[in-house]
């Protein structure tokens, strides 16, 4: 199993269980960086029923170890300099989408008020 961890661990405000609204990956063309964007509700019980964007907070966590290769693949290097393909970029109607390989999973978790995000290569139950 290989894990690519974001070096950022921002603090977040915990309002209760199930307050994570979304998690997506975005590619920033200017900085050539992959980011996990995690959105939380900042009101207790807000969830999807709370439509006021001022009650949401989106946190961006970079993955600087992920690069775009000359074939358009998102790749990272292992500690033995093994190249791992994580996914690719795909043009869509609203811009560029990050498409992960089926064995790669974005995981975002908050513990003790700090947010962590990582890309796990392999099954989610190992």
Image: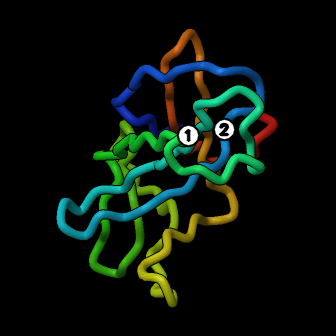
Residue 25, percent across and down? 49, 57
Q: Real-space Cα distance between discs 2 and 1?
A: 12 Å
Q: Secondary structure at mark 2?
A: strand
Image quarter where the N terminus lies is: top right
Residue that numbered label 1 is attached to: 55
Using the image as rendered, state which of residue 25 and residue 67 is in the foreground: 25
Frontmost of labels 2 and 1 is 1
Q: Measured along the vertical axis of the image, is residue 11 above or below residue 31?
A: above
Residue that numbered label 2 is attached to: 20
Using the image as rendered, state which of residue 99 and residue 10 is in the foreground: 10
The residue at the point 72 percent across, 21 percent down is 16
The residue at the point 39 percent across, 60 percent down is 75
Using the image as rendered, state which of residue 67 and residue 91 is in the foreground: 91
Contact (Cβ within 8 Å) of mark 2 with mark 1: no
Residue 51, percent across and down? 66, 53
Task: Tell me which label, 2 or 1, sits earlier in the chain.
Answer: 2
Q: Is residue 95 left or right of residue 53?
A: left
Residue lying furthest top in this view? 112
């Amino acid at each position: 199993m290989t894990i690519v961890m974001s070096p950022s661990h921002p603090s977040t405000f915990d309002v209760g269980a199930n307050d994570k609204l979304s998690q997506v990956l975005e590619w920033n063309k200017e900085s050539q960086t992959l980011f996990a964007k995690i959105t939380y509700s900042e009101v207790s019980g807000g969830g999807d029923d709370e439509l006021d964007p001022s009650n949401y907070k989106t946190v961006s966590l970079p993955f600087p170890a992920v690069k775009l290769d000359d074939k358009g693949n998102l790749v990272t290097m292992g500690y033995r300099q093994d190249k791992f393909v994580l996914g690719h970029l795909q043009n869509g109607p609203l811009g560029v989408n990050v498409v992960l390989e089926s064995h790669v999973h974005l995981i975002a978790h908050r513990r003790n008020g700090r947010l962590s995000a990582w890309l796990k290569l392999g099954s989610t139950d190992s």
